[in-house]
Image (spheres, helix red, strand yellow):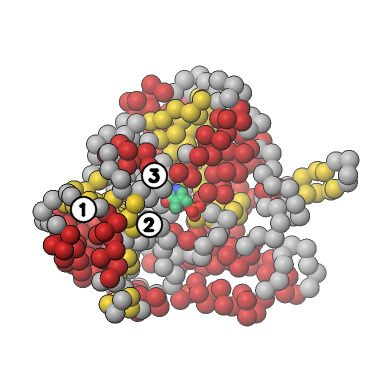
Amino acid sequence: MKLETPFNVEALRKDFPILNREVNGKPLVYFDNAATSQTPQQVIDCIVDYYSNYNANIHRGVHTLSQEATDKYEAARLKIQKHFNANKSHEIIFTSGTTHGINLVANGFSSLLNKGDEIIVSALEHHSNIVPWQMLCERTGAILKVIPMNEDGELVISEYDKLLSNNTRLVFVNHISNALGTINPIEAIIEKAHQIGAAVLIDGAQACPHIKPDVQALDVDFYVASAHKMCGPTGVGILYGKEAWLNKLPPYQGGGEMIAEVTFEKTTYADLPHKFEAGTPNICGGIAFGAAIDYMNQVGFNAIADYEHDLLEYATKKLLEIEGLKIYGTSKHKTSVISFNIAGIHPYDIGTILDKMGIAVRTGHHCAQPIMDFFKIPGTVRASFAFYNTKAEIDALVEGVKKATNMLL
Ligand SMILES: *Cc1c(COP(=O)(O)O)cnc(C)c1O
């Protein structure tokens, strides 16, 4: 990678071997970045290096390979701590991803909630941020309340104000909606929750590919993310939690690594972060997550935001020139995600034809059925752009959608 100003997308694209491949005889146009991002050579090299040179189990070994793997894994934790600006490295818990992090917190709150306590979620949530709370409510008798959204796909904060009460214990909102790209006003959401003493978990899965969150400045209680949406591998992510909260929550899973002492009468738990890291973790994944964070910081989050904003404006304008095309999620505050439909055509049919042209988009409800219900549609076509996409690729998408429309109408 060689960084230049202005943003040199052609140079960056060389870091991603997959962008050279063809699909159905056409150059790949990858616009499914909100589902998973592509992996730069630097991260691939890190994975190859791990399995080629120091693959070993961590923490328990006296031998050299185990020490090397432990050092690199813990160095990755420090990198992640610095990236998210956590106060302490043991406030960073390695997880298998966002879903795991949310479930860990939801499970922990089982013993802290009483019947009649209230949990607030938002209408813009991913299923992974709805179902664990429904399960928590079933276990505890707590009540789930939902912040509604408006036609632009924005949360209605005046309604949130009305939902907050002395019974509110927890608020769970995503930082950025995966289905619509809306950037939620999480600063205000967190502040208002804290005024009445509720804790806040932010789902950052969709935000971390675009911005660098500062958990201390946000004063957020919990923040979760997945590596695979930010140039890292699948199967690894983090839960950030304030130390006081992590000490209060009981462990999620029992097993090796998470204990201090075990007898059949009683087990005492290990200190943070190990209390929440039972069993052999995704060691290589954690180390590669660190490499992905290094890579993204080298590209630079300000440069990424500016460039992606440009792509979003360009694509929005071009797509809206197509007759019958409607975009869902029209907030001024959004990232490079465009969810759309063409009147009279099922999104799946458009996606299938685009694939024939080598263009990868997502179709369906995007794990956010309540949003689709709001708009009274079965789903959308979603094109999500990353910093390695180009305007020429957007032109190919626009041409593809036009062709599909002509074939299907
Ligand atoms: C992708 C995503 C998730 C789920 O992440 P996993 O890596 O599948 O656990 C949760 N929330 C949002 C907003 C997402 O975009």
User: SS for tag 2?
Assistant: loop
Question: Residue 280: x, y in percent?
Answer: 70, 60
Q: Residue sitting at 24 percent across and 56 percent down?
A: 312
Asked if residue 309 shows in the view, the reply is no
CA distance for labels 2 and 1? 23 Å
Viewer-nearest of discs 2 and 3:
3
Task: Using the image as rendered, state which of residue 199 and residue 253 is in the foreground.
Answer: 253
Which quadrant of the view contains residue 290?
bottom right
> Is residue 95 or residue 68 the one in the foreground?
95
Q: Is residue 284 above or below residue 143?
A: below
Residues 355 and 49: in front is 355
Q: Is residue 15 above or below residue 117?
A: below
Per the image, the residue denoted by label 3 is 368
Q: Nearer the viewer, mark 2 or mark 1?
A: 1
Q: Which residue is mark 2?
A: 34
> Type of residue at label 1?
Ile
At mark 1, the secondary structure is loop
Residue lying at 85% horizontally and 48% vertically, measured from the top left: 262
| Mark closer to the chain start, 1 or 3 | 1
Quarter of the N terminus within the rendering? bottom left
- Residue drawn where x is 55% and y is 60% of the image: 235
Image point (52%, 34%), residue name: 134
Q: Is residue 52 above or below residue 224?
A: below
